[in-house]
Image (cartoon, grey):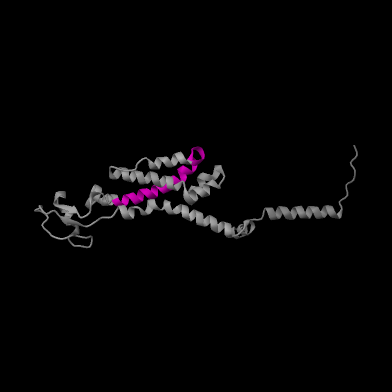
Amino acid sequence: MKIKNFKYSKSNYENIDEDKKLNESTNKKMDIDEIMRQIGEFGRSQFLSLVILCLIMIPASYQTYLITFVGINPPWTCNLESVECNKTGVFFANHEFYNKRCSMKRESWKFIKKKHFSIVTEWDLVCEKLAATYTVFTVIQVGDIIGSIAFGVASDKENGLSIRKVAKMFKIPPSSVQFIWEKYLKTKSVANNGVRGRKRSTTPRVNRCIVGKIE
């Protein structure tokens, strides 16, 4: 079998050079600024997406800032029939007599607010139990971390609506322990929504759990 002689023309060399330049440009490493110039920089569409995502995160932030209001430690006063507590007036946090109640019986003093004013008044989170008030915020952050990773995988396998229903199981917590557990569940649900959930929804399925780790 004879092989015909193949002669390269000028156009053949030009095509080879173009292919070589194309391969070099394809393999070229690009920084983030160059990528943004290629896909389009910040414009009207990106601004609208940013506004929508910020609006989504407004209700999600309630779980974090709620403890500022429900964890208020109101002032207290002595019971009129108490012999142990014989002071008059209302004692605020900056009063020198404020912490004296820790050495008294619970029947000797009372809050000036109603029982359901805050979690402090409802469960008597004072003195040695005061740390439980700040534990709620710690549990919220732990739930945020775990929810970002675990719910990123769960949202691919289960219906997101059914996952959010878990956070609605406890509406009226009867104890401080259940209140903390409720905040943990709700924060895990929040971590699956908002900005993090939006990022995972636009990420390939196999890499979605990684998004929660690198945020």
Left or right of 136 on screen, residue 29: right
Residue 35, percent across and down? 62, 57
Please name the residue shown 45% across and 39% down the image.
162
In depth, the one of 79 and 85 nearer the eye is 79
Left or right of 32 on screen, residue 163: left
Using the rendered view, name the quadrant where residue 4 is placed: top right
Residue 212, percent across and down? 48, 48
- Residue 156's place in the image compared with 19, above or below, is above
Please name the residue shown 50% across and 54% down the image.
52
Start-end of magenta stretch: 133-159
Residue 132, percent across and down? 28, 49
Residue 156, percent across and down? 51, 40
Residue farthest left in this picture: 83
Using the rendered view, name the quadrant where residue 18 is placed: bottom right
Q: Quadrant of the N terminus?
A: top right
Q: Main secondary structure of the magenta part?
A: helix
